Image (cartoon, grey):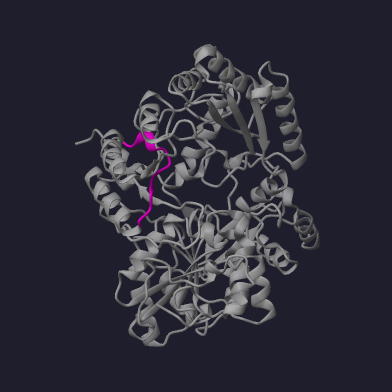
Amino acid sequence: MNENLALNDETLLDLEKPERYIGNEVNSVYKDKNAVDIRFAMCFPDVYEIGMSHLGIQILYGMFNSYEDVWCERVYSPWVDADKVFREKDIPLFALESQDEIRKFDFLGFTIQYEMCYTNILQILDLSKIPLLAKNRDWDYPIVIGGGPCTYNPEPITDFFDMFYIGEGETKYREIFDLYKKSRKEGISRQEFLRRCSHISGIYVPSLYDVKYKEDGTILSMTPCYEDVPVQINKEMCLDVSNQFYPTKPVVPYIKITQDRVVLEIMRGCIRGCRFCQAGQLYKPLREKDVDHLKELALEALRNTGYEEISLSSLSSSDYSKLPELIDFLIKYCNEKKVNISLPSLRIDAFSLDVMSKVQDVKKSSLTFAPEAGTQRMRNVINKGLTEEDILRGSHEAFLGGWNKVKLYFMLGLPTETDEDILGIGDICNKVAVEYFETVPKENRNGRTIDIVASTSFFVPKPFTPFQWAPMNTKEEFLDKANKTRKGIMSQLNQKHIKYNWHEADASMMEGVLARGDRRLNEVILKAYKKGCVFDAWGEYFKFDTWMEVFDECNIDPFFYTTRERAEDEIFPWDILNCGVSKAFLLREWKTALENKPSSNCRLSCLGCGAASYGVGVCTEGRS
């Protein structure tokens, strides 16, 4: 435990939440820094409450600290008030555990979960007094490494990183650490170390590749600068998820965070194949964890943290084959110990509703459906695998079970969308309301009535999805569609029972630029940061006009990355990476989408996406 805080009491008391910067939380790890060979600063480039809720960091933090020769510590983006103090008082950014300066570490690792945190990465480097550009760093500074879903197209931020780890973090870090120790002992250059790292599966060192462009702005080629550097980088994946490290002593914060509970990951991957969903493709194939092992992990984590809630984590919990057994076990234990069970990502069917009625106080909870689109044609286009009948049957069962609050999530701006699809959102909300009035007799309503919240986000095409070829709507088109949705809801018979929310169009447009961007955006991000852009994921701090100014100054057209439909044979910035799902399969799915046709899920039949090459998980079910 460290009692020598980098910020004095006077400074801490001036901050909105000083607990973000003092460390010493329950289960945080302390080691003798002189007894370890490698010091790793693990960073989530957003505010403490968001970063502390991230399971991936908890996994790697626990795993790295299980190595005797490594001490992993944490760092998050200082909030706006602290950022000002760090700059005014010239205080270098520090790690929570030791309170030592980040620039003195061997590695600085970022988990990059969403594009709108890119300027926060520069904030961390800047406050740490680490050169923003990787080419300006020598051995006096940490190796800066990025991981997480955004690294499946890291091109817009390649100038700021020494390397990227593509895939699941449990498999190759030990090899990286051993190579680092060997390289430092041999006294080789930083650049030579990075070149050796490129030989490790899953490691992408962007400085070792040359990108050329055609006259129309699309990519002509991405080629290695040396013969021994791989032409394509394959994602890393855990083949046996049950026997990988999993944290049963996660760090417990002093203050309330976004996900303030034990998180139990029950499986990785998804069988559903929604065409807009990047995670569904990146984490293929679905791999389940052993149910008996999960029971042990759950009990151990609850004992080690004192949390009063446990949440099951996966992309689609209903598809976990042993869910009934796991739920029955948890209900028995949690009821005795007065622990709540949270069940996100359930498909709303009779089993799920039965489970939720056992674990939730139905008077307080609302039920969530994600139809994503207002008509069946549109749900076929996106391969949602959910019919209107499913939604209404689920609503009926829910209303019988005592629920009267329903949240419905939709997307606007999906490929091939028409006004009919937009107006269908209001229509389906109204049908859910009608279902309530037909299901629950007036005398059983106890003075309550149906409360529906419809929310729309704006569709952003992502790399490694069938929609990576799709054009994206402009900000104006998005707002026009939100207005049509609002009018459609207001025209419904039961409109007074329906509340409508929509997402920020500016932020969606910017996310679309960064999601499918190339290396030319590094200059834009750097200039935007220098003009004060930071915490772009937070609406009150997002400076859309500043970003547009910077695009102008850099002579880069942001719409090149958003509104343009891609040619079938275009080379994408992320084609240098292989996520295990073939481009040919994604193109086939794109064409099937344009025919308004759904595709099967992985358990019903194999679509030949390429993930079977790993020889694990759902791809091997039913085979001897």
Determine the residue positioned at 31% across, 58% down.
248
- Residue 568, x across and y down, in percent: 59, 40
Residue visible at 51% across and 80% down?
5
Q: Is residue 219 left or right of residue 322?
A: right
Instruction: Tell which of 542 and 593 is nearer to you.
Output: 542
Residue bounds of the magenta highlight:
306-320
Task: Examine the structure image and report whether residue 240 is included in the region drawn in magenta.
Answer: no
Taking the spot 61% from the left edge, 61% from the top edge, the residue there is 118
Tag count in the figure?
0
Q: Is residue 10 left or right of residue 395?
A: right
Quadrant occupied by the N terminus = bottom left
Q: Vertically, is 461 above or below 51?
A: above
In the image, 441 versus 550, the foreground residue is 441
**Above or below, comparing residue 141 to residue 412 in the picture:** below
Q: Quadrant of residue 196?
A: bottom left
- The quarter of the picture where the C terminus appears is top left
- Residue 560 image position (x, y, % from top left): 71, 49
Q: In this view of the protein, can residue 129 be seen by the observer?
A: no
Q: Nearer the viewer, residue 561 or 481?
A: 481
For residue 335, which quarter of the picture?
top left
The question of residue 307 being in magenta is answered with yes
Return the x and y of residue 419 as percentages of the image width and height: 71, 24
511 or 230: nearer the viewer: 511
Left-right relation of 565 to 606: right
The x and y percentages for residue 350 are: 38, 23
Rendered image quadrant of residue 126 = bottom right
Give the residue at the far left of this rendering: 624
Q: Could one spot residue 119 in this view of the protein?
A: yes
Q: Is residue 101 above or below residue 108?
A: below
Q: Would you place residue 529 above or below residue 234 in this image?
A: below
Residue at figure coordinates x 74%, y 41% from the top left: 474
